[in-house]
Image (cartoon, helix red, strand yellow):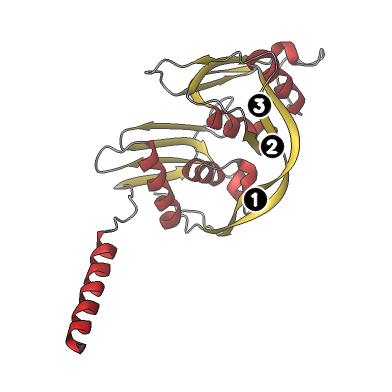
Amino acid sequence: MIWRFVARVGLWVLAIALCVTGVQAQPSFAVASIHPSGQSVKFERDGRTDTSPGHLLMKDVTVQTCIKWAYGVQRSQVIGPAWIESEHIDIDAKADEPADVPQLKLMLQALLADRFKLTFHHDKKELKGFVMTVAKAGLKMHPSPPDAAHVWQNSANGTVATGITMREFADYMAGPMEAPIVDETGLPGKYDFTLDFTNYLPSDMHVMTGEATGVLIAAMQGELGLKVEGRRTMVDVMVVDHVEKPSDN
């Protein structure tokens, strides 16, 4: 009986070992260069992020921007040292084989841990934020065709975008509005839109400058049919425990 018990235990241990060894390691880039940003990206607060299968190119971004993109969080959800918002870098990273955007995000997480020594913990914090719903007059955005490219192009007084989900729209607009935006539109799929702020600027202002929240809220409702209202809410946040500036390479 004892030997049968020992044999069973041995089989359990072997099964557990096989499960553990079968777990795939987090994917990582084969090569990645990181340098101080050589040139700013016009009209883009978070620089520019371009992807192709197995390739991530980020221009004029901050470490906070990298964390946002890699972990799918908004600016107000990242709590860390001031320099992660102020120092701009360029990243050119490539994988050994084609990889889609979700895989590239996992690879950027690994890069942040390896090259920036990023560690963090999760917490909850009550923040002043916004909730986004469809206005009573109805949505003015158009569903994207199935093959629409993911494009977001800013100008001095507006934005043209294609292939954007409501979650992506809320995450992006949370930056200039400097507060979390919760998507409660219930809208699935992707959308195309043109957002022009010109008709919503004060009479003495010709381009978007300074405090933009009121202008953005008015333009989103008037141009896109999206209602945005202020609300305090408990939000999941990432608290940075440690992060380092990577050396040039």
- Dot 3 corresponds to which residue? 133
Which residue corresponds to the image point at 40% horizontal and 35% vertical from the top-left?
A: 57
Q: Residue at x 51, y 54 (%)?
A: 245
Is tag 1's residue or tag 3's residue first in the polypeptide sequence? Answer: 1
| Residue sitting farthest toward the bottom | 2
Nearer to the camera, 248 or 139: 139
Q: Is residue 98 above or below residue 67?
A: above
Choose mark 2 or mark 3, whichever is in front: 3
Give the residue pinned by disc 2.
178
Residue at 29% x, 64% y is: 20
* Label 1 Cα crowd, 10 Å radius (few <14 / some 14-19 / many 20+): few
Q: Nearer the viewer, mark 1 or mark 3?
A: 3
Compare residues 92 and 148 and report the one nearer the observer: 148
Residue 12: where, in percent of width, then height? Answer: 25, 73
Q: Up-down: is 23 above or below 59?
A: below
For the residue pair 69 and 61, the one nearer the viewer reads as 69
Task: Tell me the crowding category of disc 3: few under 14, some 14 to 19, or many 20 or more residues within 10 angstroms, Cα based.
Answer: many
Report the Cα–Cα distance between label 1 and label 2: 15 Å
Q: Position of residue 23 (x, y in %)?
A: 29, 58
Q: Is residue 29 above or below residue 55?
A: below
Vertical comparison of 55 with 106: above or below: above
Disc 2 element = loop
Tell me the crowding category of disc 2: few under 14, some 14 to 19, or many 20 or more residues within 10 angstroms, Cα based: some
Q: Which mark is residue 82?
A: 1
